[in-house]
Image: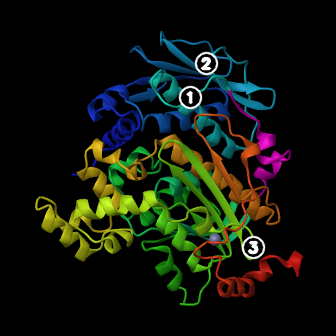
C-alpha cells in the first residue's frame, strides 16, 4: 500500500493547489532538459545535483535528447539546444550565482567551495519547477535569484575548504533533511565520528527526497542503510548507524551520557521539541514546512537565546492534526504522540483496517501511514498540511544550509551570526531576516529555572570565554 515517490509528489502538489491528485500527477509529468558544458568539473557536478533532484520530482530530467521538453535549464554560456517553450538560465554574474528566466548568463567557472554547488542546484531546480508549473503555482518570483555567497557565508569562503574535525556528533533523523545534510557534508574535508540515529525504515514515498536511496533500499532501516551507502563518500569521517530514537541511542553510552553536538533532521515538531530534553550542548537544526520554506535553528548552551522548544512550540494545528491521525487510524492521541508505530499499535491499526499487515506498519511514521490512507481532501484540513512531503530540492536545501552552517560553527564555535532563519526555496535568501531569537519566557523547557541551572553546570565549559 506504500505510496510511490511519484504519488507522494502528486499528493503534495494536489493539496497545495486544491486540485485532484490525478491532475497534479499530470502536471508533474514533465521533461526538463539540463544543457551544460561538460568540460568543467564544477559545472558537471552542479548539473548532476540538479538532475538527481529533478528526476525525483518530475517525469524526466537529463541532458537534451530528441524528445520534447517543457523546460530547458541552460548553465553558463551554453546555447540552448532544445525547442522547450520555457527556459531557466543559471550561472555567475561576478561573484554571485544567478538564476533567471530573462537572458543567458556568460561563461562561468564556478570556482566556489563544492558544498555551495548543492545549494545553487536546489535554487536552479526550484526555479525550473516553478516556471514549469506557472501561472497557477502559488510561489511567484518576478526577479532573478541572486546568491551572494559572501553575504550568505562571509567574505572568507576559503574557510569552507579547510579540514574540520567534528569530534563526536549525533544526527537525529536519517530521512529527507538528514540525507540533505549527509549529501552536502561529504564535500567538506571532514573527520571524526557521526552517529546516525533513526528508528524507522525507508519507504517508497521517501524516495522522492532521500537522494542517497533507491528502490533497493526500501524496507531497510534508514540509519543502517544511509551509513552503508554514504560511508564510502567520507574517507576520514566514521559513520555509525543506530536504528533507534536519539534518546535510546544516547543511553547506549550510559544513562547519564550527554551529547555535546546534535544535528537534527527529524520530521515531527513534537520529536524535535523533545530532543532538547536530552540536554545536548550544541544544537544544529533544520526543518521544512511542506514545500513552502526551510527553517534553520542553532543553539549552544548555556544560553539566553531560544531553544528547540521555543522554536517549535506546541501549536493548535499540531494538536488538531494529531487528533485527525488518531481518529483515522483508530488510536489514542498518546499513541500517536509516540512518533512511530510499535508492534502493539500496528496490531490495533490492523483491527480497523483489516487489509493491512502489521509487519508492513511496524517502524513507520504515523504521518506516512495516515497520508496513504487519506484522500487529498483530508490533507487540506487543519493541520493536514503538516504531512505534505516536500519536493527533493526543498529538503536538500534544508540539509545543505544545515551542513554549511554546521561546518562554519564547528570550526568557529563563537561565530553566532544568527540562531534562527527562514528561507524560501522559491525566492532570494533574505539575510536581513536572520534573527538572534531570544528565549521564550513561557517555553515548556527553558523557562524552568531549575533546568537552566542544570544546563549551566553541565555545559558552561562550552563558553570558556565567559568564565
Ligand atoms: Zn526554550
Q: Which mark is residue 127?
A: 1
Task: Name the spot of residue 265 as percent of width and height, x first.
Answer: 53, 60
Nearer to us in this view, 117 or 392: 392
| CA gap, disc 1 and disc 2 | 9 Å
Q: Residue at x 67, y 88 (%)?
A: 450
* 177 relative position to 193: left or right: left
Badge 3 element:
loop
- Res 188 visible: no
Which of marks 2 and 3 precedes in the sequence?
2
Residue annotated with mark 3: 303
Q: Are marks 3 and 1 in contact (CB under 8 Å)?
A: no
- The answer to whether the beta carbon of the residue marked 2 is less than 8 Å from any atom of ligand 1 is no
The numbered mark, 3 or 1, whose residue comes first in the sequence reads 1
Residue 152 magenta: yes
Magenta segment: does it hold 13? no
Which segment is the magenta one? 145-163
Q: Residue furthest left?
A: 354
The residue depicted at 44 percent of the width and 24 percent of the height is: 136
Quick one: SS at disc 1? Answer: helix
Q: Is mark 1 within 8 Å of ligand 1?
A: no
The correct choice, above or below, for 332 with respect to 115 in the image is below
Q: Badge 1 local density, few (<14 within 10 Å), some, or many (20+)?
A: many
Q: Residue under circle 2?
A: 101
| Residue at image coords 45%, 60% | 316
Amino acid at each position: 500500500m506504500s505510496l510511490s515517490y511519484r504519488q507522494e509528489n502528486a499528493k503534495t502538489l494536489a493539496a497545495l493547489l486544491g486540485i485532484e491528485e490525478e491532475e497534479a500527477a499530470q502536471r508533474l509529468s514533465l521533461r526538463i532538459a539540463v544543457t551544460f558544458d561538460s568540460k568543467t568539473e564544477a559545472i558537471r557536478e552542479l548539473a548532476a545535483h540538479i538532475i538527481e533532484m529533478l528526476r525525483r520530482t518530475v517525469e524526466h530530467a537529463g541532458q537534451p535528447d530528441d524528445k520534447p521538453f517543457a523546460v530547458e535549464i541552460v548553465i553558463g554560456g551554453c546555447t540552448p539546444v532544445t525547442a522547450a517553450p520555457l527556459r531557466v538560465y543559471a550561472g555567475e554574474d561576478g561573484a554571485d550565482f544567478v538564476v533567471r528566466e530573462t537572458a543567458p548568463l556568460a561563461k562561468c567557472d564556478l570556482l566556489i567551495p563544492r558544498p555551495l554547488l548543492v545549494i545553487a542546484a536546489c535554487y536552479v531546480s526550484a526555479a525550473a519547477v516553478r516556471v514549469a508549473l506557472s501561472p497557477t503555482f502559488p510561489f511567484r518570483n518576478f526577479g532573478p535569484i541572486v546568491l551572494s555567497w559572501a553575504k550568505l557565508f562571509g567574505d572568507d569562503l576559503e574557510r569552507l575548504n579547510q579540514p574540520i574535525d567534528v569530534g563526536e556528533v549525533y544526527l537525529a533523523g536519517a530521512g529527507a533533511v538528514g540525507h540533505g545534510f549527509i549529501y552536502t557534508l561529504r564535500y567538506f574535508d571532514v573527520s571524526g565520528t557521526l552517529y546516525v540515529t533513526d528508528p524507522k525504515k525507508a519507504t517508497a514515498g521517501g524516495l522522492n527526497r532521500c537522494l542517497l536511496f533507491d528502490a533497493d533500499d526500501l524496507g531497510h532501516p534508514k540509519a543502517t542503510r544511509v551509513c552503508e551507502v554514504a560511508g564510502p563518500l567520507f574517507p576520514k569521517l566514521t559513520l555509525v548507524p543506530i536504528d533507534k530514537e536519539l534518546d535510546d541511542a544516547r543511553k547506549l553510552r550510559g544513562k547519564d551520557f550527554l551529547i555535546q553536538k546534535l544535528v537534527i533532521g527529524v520530521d515531527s515538531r513534537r520529536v524535535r521539541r523533545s530532543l532538547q530534553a536530552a540536554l545536548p550542548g550544541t544544537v544544529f537544526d533544520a526543518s521544512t514546512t511542506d514545500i513552502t520554506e526551510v527553517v534553520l535553528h542553532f543553539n549552544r548552551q548555556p544560553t539566553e537565546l531560544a531553544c528547540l522548544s521555543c522554536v517549535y512550540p506546541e501549536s493548535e494545528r499540531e494538536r488538531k492534526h494529531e487528533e485527525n491521525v488518531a481518529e483515522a487510524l483508530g488510536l489514542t492521541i498518546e499513541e500517536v504522540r509516540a512518533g512511530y508505530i510499535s508492534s502493539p499499535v500496528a496490531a490495533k491499526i490492523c483491527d480497523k483496517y483489516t487489509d493491512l499487515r502489521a509487519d508492513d506498519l511496524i517502524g513507520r511514521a504515523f504521518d506516512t501511514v495516515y497520508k496513504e490512507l487519506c484522500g487529498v481532501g483530508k490533507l487540506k484540513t487543519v493541520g493536514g498540511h503538516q504531512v505534505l512531503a516536500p519536493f527533493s530540492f526543498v529538503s536538500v536545501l534544508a540539509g545543505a544550509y544545515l551542513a554549511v552552517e554546521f561546518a562554519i560553527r564547528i570550526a568557529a564555535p563563537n561565530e553566532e551570526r544568527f540562531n534562527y532563519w527562514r528561507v524560501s526555496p522559491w525566492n532570494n535568501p533574505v539575510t536581513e531576516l536572520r534573527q538572534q531569537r531570544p528565549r521564550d519566557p513561557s517555553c515548556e523547557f527553558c523557562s524552568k529555572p531549575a533546568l537552566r541551572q542544570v544546563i549551566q553546570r553541565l555545559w558552561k565549559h562550552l563558553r570558556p570565554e565567559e568564565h
